[in-house]
Image (spheres, grey):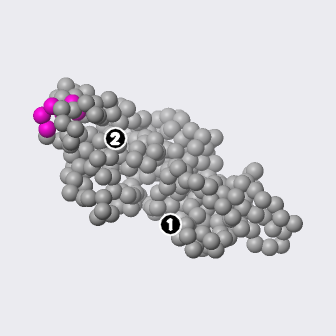
Amino acid sequence: MEQVLNGIIIKGIGGFYYVEADGEVYECKARGAFRKKKITPLAGDNVTFTVREGKENTIDEIHDRKNFLLRPPVANIDTLIIVSSIKEPVPSLLVIDKMTAIAVNKGIKPCVVFSKSDLGDTSEYEAVYQKAGIDVTSVCCKTGEGVDKVREMIGNGITVFTGNTGVGKSSLLNCIDERFSLATGEISDKLGRGRHTTREATLYHVGDGWVADTPGFSSLDIEQTSEIIMKDDLPFCFPEFAEYLGNCKFTSCSHTVEKGCLILDALKNGDIDPKRHESYVSMYNDVKDIKEWQL
């Protein structure tokens, strides 16, 4: 007896993929055709698969992806929540800005969360991203401050949390949903795999959406393995630049030093935060000499 179903991959490990459909999880293998096409199924992929009684279940079709990351390996991401602690370690706005730009470039909504708000004042950092039109909040896992706002950020799509070691991603996830730790253990038991023994991504239901548990991954992974943002595309990855683009004096304006640049005018007028523009210039200088053919 065979049954064809549609579902979402919640985990892939060792050539096996675990697909959730209608509240049930099915262990599947991917058809050989994917290997020939050099397509690797990812957590977050929407798939059509066949369930066979007494035989191996197979993933037959991977539906079109709207985006994906390779490190962590997750597809169809709606929201990227970038977690940075206020102290221990201190925030790097350049790293955060690279993450927000990568997200915008991939059609992912960026959000910024400053953790450990009990250790210092986060208002100056929050103001940078509020001015840029990026959702931002601060959290303290000890008191629960800001946790409700982070829950709202998750929404009903797929959310990936990123941040470097020590910023408190795991503590934040446990604050968001106290069942999260329990759920990860339960599903890992169900899948017959030890928790956090691999660097694979796993999706879990949180609220009305999915959260990707990405053990061992950091914002550095995303930064180093995402496609390069070319210099012509980079200005569009800073939301606060949008209203000025296309109206500068020179059509080839790089928005770094030119006279007649509306973005530099907005910077002088205080409408664009200087820290964000510094990040833009740093990123622009990194890619300004790269040509499309070199990629």
Front residue of this view, candidates 121 and 270: 270
Using the numbered discs, state the Cα–Cα distance from disc 2 to disc 1 in whole angstroms.
32 Å
Identify the residue at image location x=52%, y=57%: 74
- Residue 225 location in percent, x, y? 38, 62
Identify the residue at image location x=44%, y=49%: 106
Amino acid marked by disc 1: Arg
Amino acid marked by disc 2: Phe
Tell me if residue 29 comes above or below residue 94 in the rendering: below
Label 1 sits on residue: 199
Can residue 185 be seen in this snapshot?
no
Label 2 sits on residue: 236
Identify the residue at image location x=58%, y=73%: 35
Front residue of this view, candidates 140 and 190: 190
- State which mark lies toward you, 2 or 1: 2
Residue extent of the magenta highlight: 258-264
- Residue 259 location in percent, x, y? 12, 34
Q: Quadrant where the N terminus lies?
A: bottom right
Label 1 neighbourhood size at 10 Å, few (<14), some (14-19), many (20+)? some
